[in-house]
Amino acid sequence: MSRVVVCGSLNMDVVVQSARRPATGETLLGATVSFLPGGKGLNQAVAAARLGVPTAMMGAVGNDAFGNGLRSFLASEDVDATGVREIDRTATGVALIQVAGKDNAITVASGANHRFTRRMIRHAPHRGEVWVAQFEIPVDETEAILKRARAARARTVLNLAPCMAHSRRLMSHVDVAVLNEIELAQATGTRLHARSALRDLALAARKLRARGAGTVVATLGMRGAIVVTAEATTVVPAVKADVVDTTGAGDCFVGALAARLLGGDSPVEAARFAGAAASCSVEKLGAAPSMPTAREVAARLARA
């Protein structure tokens, strides 16, 4: 059976909302707190599953209440969590997310995520599957996992977030690389910023393609995205949204992209759908809980 397989991080997100961020040394009262399932891997798996495609999660949690809660949440979202391994004497990953207005700042304690290895994966990749990874588990393990998946003729998607040092071989195992403009600058050693010209962003994306990635998708927030393939560079416009919380929007994009690739969409078609999905996700609080259904995305596209 064809499916999306996500190998990556699982965190409990501790979301603190306040009117503004405290200054250094300041104690700010009046905030609210929520405990929400998260981690790039979990978010991307939930995003794919809510769109109606078979999805499996591979990762690691600690033997604690947060780990139990995350596995229960995946099960409730119809994500196969049998590949999530429990590690004794290690805490489940935690992300402290401070939301002030429409912006957020995130601090991550990786915990069990940094102890996940390729040997914990007991299900071999198969042709027709889409395997997804990020950089919140050890990079060497990510490279080995994608190499194995590519050798089995599965399609591979790598979200270079957060951007980490990696071997130049890694891109040769990647069919679709997804990253934002900051990560694109870091990955290619190019000077870029939020207002960089699209031609400069496309040039940087081509540098990543030259290292072996089949397609590079650069997400640009309110500017949409650009998709760079061997044949063309395509600008995908953003879909308007009433922003509440941008946490997890990039993960929503990646999970939706993987789901549509599994269904046979081209990278450009998949990116258009993923952009609409991400626009839905930012209108709700939290990461995984904000992932939209296929019906919600279809309605958004109909209005676009």
Image (spheres, rainbow, N blue to C red):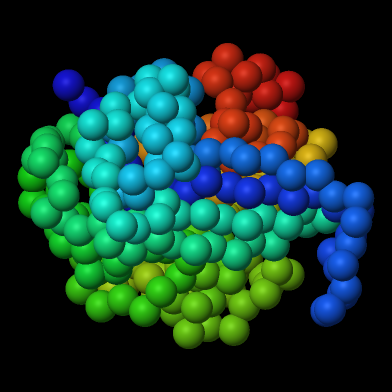
Residue drawn at point x = 30 percent, y = 66 percent: 138
Residue drawn at point x = 21 percent, y = 26 percent: 2
Foreground pick, 50 / 179: 50
Foreground pick, 144 / 218: 144
The quarter holding residue 111 reads bottom left
- x and y percentages locating residue 192 in the rendered image: 62, 77
Residue drawn at point x = 41 percent, y = 51 percent: 92
Foreground pick, 114 / 30: 30
Residue drawn at point x = 72 percent, y = 33 percent: 284
For the N terminus, the image quarter is top left
- x and y percentages locating residue 107 in the rendered image: 60, 65
Task: For residue 160, say whether it is visible.
Answer: yes
The quarter holding residue 119 reads bottom left
Seen in the picture, residue 76 relative to 161 is either above or below; the reply is: above
Total labels drawn: 0
For the C terminus, the image quarter is top right
Seen in the picture, residue 187 relative to 253 is either above or below; the reply is: below
